[in-house]
Image (spheres, rainbow, N blue to C red):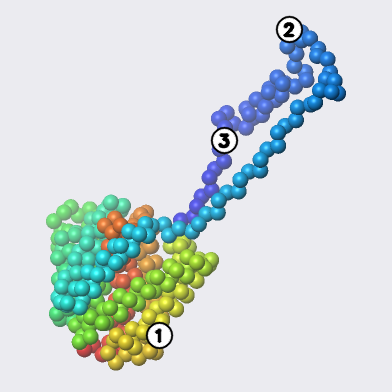
Amino acid sequence: MPIVPDTPDVPAGGGDADQDGDRGAARLSGPLFRDETPQTPQAPKTPQEPMPSAAPQPAPAAAPKQKKSAGRDLGAAIGVGVGLGAVIIASLFIVKAVFVGVIAVAVVVGLWELTSRLEERKGIKAPLVPLAVGGAAMVVAGYVRGPEGAWVAMALTALAVLVWRMTEPPEGYLKDVTAGVFAAFYVPFLATFVAMMLTADDGAWRVLTFLILTVVSDTGAYAIGWRFGKHKLAPRISPGKTREGLLGAVLFAMVAGVLCMQFLVDDGTWWQGLVLGVLVAASATLGDLGESMIKRDLGIKDMGTLLPGHGGIMDRLDSLLPTAPVVWLLLVLFVGSS
């Protein structure tokens, strides 16, 4: 958002009145003014009397140099991030079905945040109940039945949104159901690709690769952009993003991609990791910009306050959601689906 410069303060009464006042002050203090009572003239000071001199004024202290700030509680952000990471890793490698449940819970909370902000800021009432039920079912269907199950669940969820909204007055019907179908695609449908990664024999390692690459991409963008960023990437959408940060995201993700494809994914090779890293950095950046666009349209900074130091669940899913189908598709092309 462009910053509007502060308007100079204008004293009450306008400029002409102030000029008249200045002239009046000059008349009262100038050489033409005489008191009504005659004053006794004072004798001039003798040379022996030293003339008072003004004390030397100390030089103004230099303003302290401002340090760059991340803008969030870094300690809380790290603590929450470590806690979430522990839950994800434990559920991912102990019982796969539990991790599917973690995805479903994240989807439902994300839908609640998104629909709440839409209603608060725009008056759009996307029906949460069919979205939450259909979203959770979509994740499970993708895990059990693959892409076909995910598409069928998506279609049924959209139909449920259309029917559910018919129970209310027709005013705003079109915008409400449009927002509902958008929310169903944006949150649960994209998240279903994470569940579909999990169905492979090395599914846990594929999901871990997806998470590592996305987090490393975001970290590289933040670290390089914060330190060296000078050229804005998309100032009208996200003023903090820089081209240098995007380059950092690509480089970090490429290195992580090589390591993950070489050591974590079955039958993976290093050059596949390079391709994966480049596309993950691109999709993660676009996902972040996409949610920034939504939040700018809504006039908010964060989607929620559930995660201290991070914002809401949707503020953590912004780069993960669009990256999930990219990683799923590339891994299927590179090493197969099983």
Residue beneath the point at 53% across and 45% down: 6
Q: Residue at 14% across / 80% down in the picture?
A: 144
Label 2 or label 1, whichever comes before in sequence order: 2
| Kind of residue indicated by mark 3 | Val
The answer to which of 241 and 181 lies nearer the viewer is: 241
Q: Nearer the viewer, residue 252 or 289?
A: 252
- Residue 151 position (above or below residue 29): below
Mark 3 or 2: the one toward you = 2
Q: How far separated are the C-alphas under marks 2 and 1? A: 95 Å
Give coordinates of residue 337: x percent, y percent. Answer: 23, 88
To which residue does mark 2 refer? 37
> SS at mark 1?
helix
Q: Residue at x 42, y 72 (%)?
A: 220
Labels 3 & 2 near each other (Cβ < 8 A): no
* Residue 317 placement (x, y as % from top left): 30, 67
Q: Is residue 58 left or right of residue 239?
A: right
* Nearer the camera: disc 1 or disc 3: 1
Q: Answer above or below: position of 272 versus 253.
A: below
The residue identified by callout 1 is: 274
Residue 54 in view (yes/no) = yes
- Tell me the distance, in whole angstroms, between the alpha carbons under discs 1 and 3: 60 Å
Distance, label 3 to label 2, CA atoms, is 39 Å
**Which residue does the numbered mark 3 point to in the structure image?**
10
Quarter of the picture containing the C terminus is: bottom left
Residue 81 in the image, given as x and y percentages of width and height = 30, 65
Q: Residue at x 68, y 38 (%)?
A: 57
